[in-house]
Image: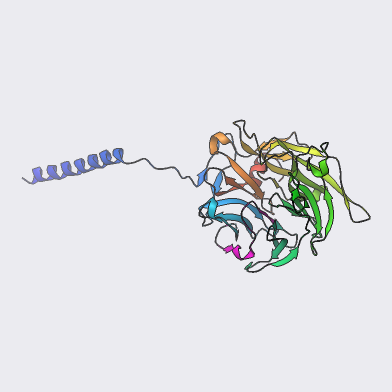
Amino acid sequence: MGRRQRLGSTARVFLAVVSMLVLASCALPLLPDLSVLHQRDGRPTLHRLNWGYAYVDSGVWSPDGRWVAAFAGPDYLADNPVVVSPDGRVRHSLTNWHCGLNGDFDFVWSPDGQLGCIVASDFGRRLCRGRAPAFRTCQEVRLPQELGRTGMGSTFSSDGQTLWIAAIHDLSPNESTRDPNLFVVMAATGALVQMFVFSADEWNLPDIVDGGVYLPQWVPQHQALSYEIGVADSEGPGQLVMSPVTPEADGHFVLGPRTVLASGQAEQGYAWSPSGRWVAVRIGIDYGNDHIALVNADDPSQTVDVTNEQDVGQFLGPTWSPDGSTLLVFGAGDERPYAIDIGSYLASKGLQP
């Protein structure tokens, strides 16, 4: 009797184990961790950041690395200008700055760490500047009346004295250029210093065929300005170029010969490494090989692939941390920020950031 009971107990244990195995075989498969994107061929891993927003557009890193100014919100139609810490733990809304809608104004950081928004609209032309930690208020500087629609890129010079703005030129109250020109204004007063002509219809001069200027960035390591030309209605093919900048005695500037850094650009953003050695750009637009790559500024034929569309999809708007270690990119599919350990990736290839 006792032996039969022991056998029965063993049988029950055996059946329980079999049942667990059967249930396990019918369980749902483990879902992949979509917050970490892996790539083939030794390309770096992408880590999705949680900034507390369902939608995040492009971002601009502050010079001290403590903040990223971005467009974020529940969706594209309800995004707002914000400032977040890179880990997303601290967030500030800038709605009380009244910068306008995404695409109507530019974020720009001054070398001394002030954040500015530049907007020209029916409500005025102004630079609004504020400081950490709270970014509650901003001080306004009036900008020239000739400055038309903004939102196509702006940058401070490395000394912070001048501001370089890509904007439509208002020729008169009823007439404007089709493509943006490049305005240079005094950062402290907003006084117009100079305008560089890039628009094909400026003063009816059809021989100027650049098709406008977009996304200027000052590159102090090269004493140069980088910018995109030939971008029509945010479509390619455009070129990312770099021109040396020479100041003149009268306070004006000369843009020197252009070095082409990348072709097929379409106003989707690019980022310089702190050393000025590399520029991160989006390459392969409309050709099925869309990816982020690094271009050597001294030898543009040398490129290093960072993302692969076939592995992780499309990414836009790279921005580089001031310490050179991290590259932020923004997913075109899920519209979220991702961090790449770009310093380690370059080191793995024997390259300096």
| Residue 237 position in % (x across, y down) | 70, 35
278 or 132: nearer the viewer: 132
| Residue 338 position in % (x across, y down) | 57, 48
Q: Quadrant of residue 185?
A: bottom right
341 or 162: nearer the viewer: 162
- Is 92 part of what is drawn in magenta? yes
Residue at far front of view: 174
Q: Tally the marks.
A: 0
Residue at far top of view: 287
| Residue 192 position in % (x across, y down) | 83, 57
Q: Is residue 290 left or right of 205 when viewed as pictured?
A: left
What colour-coding does the image apply?
Answer: rainbow
Q: Is residue 60 visible?
A: yes
Q: Is residue 164 left or right of 9 when viewed as pictured?
A: right
| Residue 330 position in % (x across, y down) | 59, 47
| Residue at 26% from the left image edge and 38% from the top image edge | 22
140 or 351: nearer the viewer: 140
Location of residue 247 with respect to 28 vertically, above or below: below
Q: Is the N terminus in the top left, top right, bottom left or bottom right quadrant?
A: top left
Q: Quadrant of residue 110?
A: bottom right
Q: Is residue 49 visible?
A: no
| Residue at 92% from the left image edge and 52% from the top image edge | 248
Q: Which residues are magenta?
A: 87-107
Residue at far left of view: 1
| Residue at 75% from the left image edge and 39% from the top image edge | 211
| Residue at 55% from the left image edge and 58% from the top image edge | 88
Q: Quadrant of residue 197?
A: top right
- Is 160 part of what is drawn in magenta? no
Location of residue 22 with respect to 165 vertically, above or below: above
